[in-house]
Image (tube, rainbow, N blue to C red):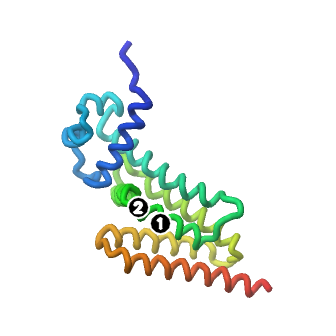
Amino acid sequence: MGRRPNPQRKQDLLEEIVAYLGENGLGEMSLRPLAKQLGTSTYTLTYQFGSKEQLLADAVDFAQARQLGVIGQWAAETPPVSASELLRRYWEWAGRPDNLRIIRMLIEATTLGHSAPFAEVGQKAVQQWIGALSEALRRDGVTEHVQRIATQTYATLVGLQVDLIATGDRSRVDRALHDLCETLDHSARTAAAVTL
């Protein structure tokens, strides 16, 4: 009976693989250059992950778990954060170079979502984001069109991330994110005024 892959080694490799894929992309990924960059062998990669497809799937799952984990953590805080605060915190987190690479990789995986191994990447993120934003909006006092506002907010957020990745124009995109947060705050203030 052969040795089983080492879970800790796999986790350590995933950290490095996600960084590599965030820089180099998923579409044309080849095991040989990846192994060289990591200072390991293609044998080690296939031993730990089984196949290139599984390596990609595990890397995307690992990156998405990190992203969704921070969103879930903030959404569950006591006292609860507002919808705009959730976006502000996320934007700050996503703007860090290491995390921005994760976002770039996840956006690419989402656009490749029609093919394995990325079939559920976008769905998972959308469901978590719409849920977290909807809950935050309700806590903010918004009662009408909550899911539509959450959907528009998430779509705008993704668009701003793509814009930042494509142009690097941080000051312009940061201002747009600030305006989006102000719109959410306005919705909350309006809802509070209506209930008084």
Mark 2 nearby-residue class (10 Å; few <14, some 14–19, many ≥20): few
Side (left or right) of 183 relative to 50: right
Q: Residue at x 60, y 71 (%)?
A: 83
In the displayed structure, would residue 129 be above or below residue 16? below
Mark 2 = which residue?
96
Q: Residue at x 38, y 78 (%)?
A: 171
Q: Measuring from the top left, give residue 38's x and y in whole percent.
A: 26, 39
Q: Measuring from the top left, give residue 51's x and y in whole percent.
A: 31, 35
Q: What amino acid is at disc 1? A: Glu
Q: Which mark is on residue 92? A: 1
Do tag 2 and tag 1 residues touch (Cβ < 8 Å)? yes
In the displayed structure, would residue 149 be above or below residue 73? below
Q: Quadrant of the N terminus?
A: top left
Kindly state the secondary structure of the residue where label 2 is placed: loop
Mark 1 nearby-residue class (10 Å; few <14, some 14–19, many ≥20): few
Tell me if residue 113 can be seen: no
Q: What amino acid is at disc 2? A: Arg
Side (left or right) of 94 relative to 139: left
